Image: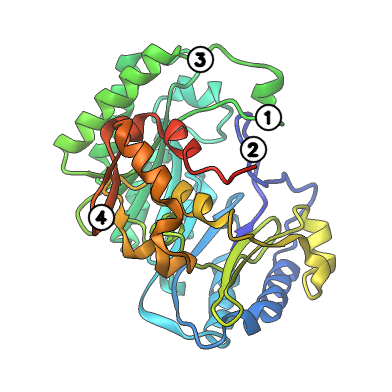
Amino acid sequence: MHIPWCVRKCPYCDFNSHEPKKTIPERDYINALIQDLEQSLPSVWGRTVDTIFIGGGTPSLFSAEGIDRLLSEIRARLPLAPTIEITMEANPGAIEQAKFAEFRSAGINRLSIGVQSLNDELLQRIGRVHSAREAYLAVEHAHDAGFEQINLDLMFALPTQTLVQAQQDLSNALALEPTHLSHYQMTIEPNTWFHKHPPATPDDELSWAMQSQCQERLGAAGFEHYEVSAYARPGKQCRHNLNYWQYGDYLGIGAGAHAKITDAAQQNITRTATVKHPNDYLQHAASEQRYATQEVLSRKEVPFEFMMNALRLTEGFPSSLFFEHTGLPLSTIDNALQQAEEQGLLEYELQWIRPTEQGRRFLNTLLTLFLPPS
């Protein structure tokens, strides 16, 4: 579920997020989300929901009452697994912190807090609206509210950041005792403020030193590196994101939300994306006009899509998963698998496929071997 409003758009952010001109139309937007969901129900009849991810934007700007109503409406329409994982993204602002206990009571059981850095100077350089102190307090409030699963988003290679600062940021984040850490490099994306006004960022050599040394520190702290930029305590991996990386199905509701649904009877996979602007979404949520794109994937596109996700996993995937989630025999990609193995990018066994350390480091090179023929 995508909630697209933020207090302020960060200069590096290319997500579908908008600064509200007036008040956020929370009630109307929740009504639209439910209408959107109802339109999608026929495509998932008989399925049980294993995870819910409320992303943004900044979903924690919504009231706890609104989130409680939203989850109640979903429970009334879809069966939820008894062990369901329900994640909400949150920023460390003081307003959001005060609502953490109420979000927990509403049913949120996993919190993802976008601290990005714990250095005030660096936070200002990347345009964040919170301070390091607010980030510390937010995590403290999350623990006090009873959240047993807490993810922290932490970036490195920030403008003017040194190796020592990157290491200190990570040490400070680990001291907050998260169960999961998303540790990723800041990149300059098109259509962002930083793309138009590029800041001075660490070069490739320094960025790699930050990444590799922080990886070692995370490993020593007991975090498993299970995906390109995801680290977790044993048993605390993000199940929602694992479903993406294992090429599972998911519904997407909200402005700019994406979905992937397999129709076993028709033997096809459909991808959809809703309109991005909140006003357009509010107007069309109850109709087919809510879709900006709707595409049935061709058989030649599916293998690349699968590998683009599954090869992000450090441990790789069971060979049988390819057929289970694509409907295609593994022989479809035999040539590419052999080339990848010969180039030292992949370990290809009868029952398991995994990227090598070199394959993980040069993932884009590995993925090009699975591109569909033009």
Element at label 3? loop
Left or right of residue 61: residue 217 = left
Foreground residue among 288 and 199: 288
The structure residue drawn at horizontal position 64% and vertical position 23%, both measured from the top left corner, is: 194
Left or right of residue 275: residue 310 = left
Q: Earlier in the sequence, mark 3 or mark 4?
A: 3
* Residue 138 visible somewhere in the drawing: no
Circles 1 and 2 in contact, beta carbons < 8 Å: yes
Query: Residue tagged by mark 3?
Result: 201
- The label on residue 14 is 2
Circles 3 and 4 in contact, beta carbons < 8 Å: no
Element at label 1? loop
Circles 1 and 4 in contact, beta carbons < 8 Å: no
Q: Quote the CA–CA distance across marks 1 and 2.
A: 7 Å
Query: Residue tagged by mark 4?
Result: 352
Nearer the observer: mark 3 or 1; the answer is 1
Foreground residue among 56 and 337: 337
The quarter of the rendered structure image containing the N terminus is bottom right
Q: Callout 2: few (<14), some (14-19), or many (20+) C-alpha neighbours within 10 Å? A: some
* Residue 72 visible somewhere in the drawing: yes
